[in-house]
Image: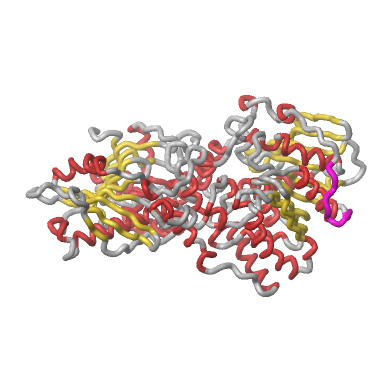
Amino acid sequence: MRNARGDESAEGEYAAFIKRSAPSATRPTAWPANREEWDKRLASVARGLRESLGPFPDEPCPLEPEVLGVVERDGLVIERLTFQSRPGVRVTANLYRPKEVSERLPAALSVHGHWSWARIDPGVQARCVALAKLGYVCLCVDAFGAGERAIEPGPGTYHGGRLGAGLWTVGRPLIGLQVYDNRRAVDYLISRPEVDPERLAITGASGGGNQSLYAGATDDRFKAVVPVCGIGTYEAYLEAACCVCEVNPGGLKYATTGDLLAMIAPRALLVVSATRDAPQFGVDAASKSVAYARRRFEGLGAADRLRFVAIESGHDYNQPMREAMYGWLDRWLRDRGDGSPVAEPEVQTEDPALLRCYPDAASRPKSIATIPEFTHREGLARLAALPAPPDHPEAWEAESIHLRAEIADRVLGCPPTASPGAPRLWREPGSDFTTLEIRPEPGITLTGHLRLPPPGTRALGTVILLADRGLDADEVRQRAEAWTKEGRAVCAVELRATGKRKPKTNPVAGAADHNEAEWGVWVGRPLLGQWVCDALGWIDAIDGLVGSSSGRLLREFVDHPLSVRSVGPIGVATILAAAYEPRVESTIVENCLVSYVAPEPSDWSGIPMGLIAPHVVEAGDVARFAALLAPRRLSILGGVETNGRPVSQERLDAAFRFAKSIYQLLKTPEALTLAVSRGE
């Protein structure tokens, strides 16, 4: 048996499938042969970035900077300040500068990774202090959702996991917010009288190295770019956990890390790696991307503007790394030296509390928007922009065709079809279940357990029970008993990357399926869309078994209704599958997620991360998905918010108001049931 990275066992199957789904697995990216091919290739990557990073404001808003205080040291001034990046969204920052300034100076934007205190962490401060002592202006900003922009500012804040992934739903991924914030940070830098706008650099480590990569690729005002311990390959992310802030939704469909490095040419690029770093940031992965980009630099006559340095170290931004950066900036922003390391001056960092813009969360203005607040605001705006219910059935028929196409393209990431073929059947000795096995698409195997009504019971139909976790025989038997006594055949089925088919990955920020969800988003196949594919595969397989001459087990169920049911937030996938499959006559979901936009800002802690898919709110939210089932029967029995809290009847009715209007429009209001319990 192979290890988890290439394991074809139940636990390794999903990871192997994802790696095969990356375009580079089937058509490795070759170096463009000439400048024209490079231009064409990188223009295509730029278009992909504009789509996946999310839309930026049409016009930049006023910066409205506020200097909140100044710390003076020998030869050095540190300002505590904020500026506005978007309307109603302010960035917390510190600006480091020499005390005496007689001319415009080169400047650097310092972006942090996942250091405990974010921008004011002593490890981040060190390079900012040193740059100011070396004659640079240095602006250091908090990333969106981190540091003083976190829900609770303080050490150890984290903006990833389901919290950061929630931004995908409104088409504003965390990586795109960071790119735009950094663009506005440049706007602020060049507004300063001390700064020479023609001599700008960006640097950061880990997640800050990733920010440096994307900023350098998308903002040519940076004349020097120095990502540290943040460069590898996109493919390497499919073998590891990474923060949501590093996930480029669908990035593997159109780009490589090497492409982004190549977009920096002919500007100066220094890539610094650590010899003992994790594989996704390691020397081997970084070397591949640098080698690819080097052809672009050479083709533009800028071979000397690309350098790759490996430092004997773990994941860090230590003094040797910083000294490599100082020398590189001196070479290309001040025309000093040959780019070799420059000795670091004596550095004295400050108590982080001294550099804070605000003493605590209570003292922050509302414009220091947290991720839940921003996601909620954007979600409400996206819902408000959706069209009102149509006023006649023909209009809804046309709209529903468009809606299904948009969901398939922007949310599911693939055509909502599956043709698994005839299932493989067997029964274990002494078992009262028949086991089924299907392959909804190459590389994915799923099993289900079929239980039939007692002999002599009149057949009423077939029920497919979808679960987002493994179901043992006793649990299947317990759930199926009432239905089989009624005369229904019940098939409890699994979905990929759940139960025994979940890869052996550790939870991240409380999300058990964190890696699995991220991997799917990376390749443009969100796990939600894959689960819909699985559900459609089961529907096709079970219906085919009922209607086939070989399906003697279910021959008495021909011409009887087929229904799908599920319990838990996964009901969103159940509803979407039924929306594309007219053979499903009734759908019942219990405790389903009722909306991707909660009444109040949410931390998303109550649902699987796999349900969080890009653009899902822009496409229409759960109520519009449910409307696609009309006039067929749909029962929503209870529901939960994104934080897992159960909803009231009033909230349930409000959340599904659009679906209710469509059922009324089609004159089948009785086919839709909305109840917080079975008794209502």
Q: Is residue 298 above or below residue 569?
A: below
Q: Position of residue 282 (x, y in %)?
A: 64, 53
Q: Position of residue 437 (x, y in %)?
A: 29, 57
From the viewer's perspective, is 487 left or right of 165?
left
User: Which SS does the magenta portion mostly show?
Assistant: loop
Q: Position of residue 215 (x, y in %)?
A: 68, 52
The residue furthest right is: 102
Query: Magenta segment: does it hold 342?
Result: yes
Task: Please state, as top left, top right, bottom left or bottom right, where the C terminus lies in the image.
Answer: top left
Task: Please state, as top left, top right, bottom left or bottom right, where the N terminus lies in the image.
Answer: bottom left
Between 389 and 462, the residue placed more toward the observer is: 462
Q: How many marks?
A: 0
Q: Position of residue 313 (x, y in %)?
A: 70, 46
**Residue at image coords 54%, 50%:** 240
Q: Is residue 197 above or below residue 596?
A: below
Between 311 and 635, the residue placed more toward the observer is: 311
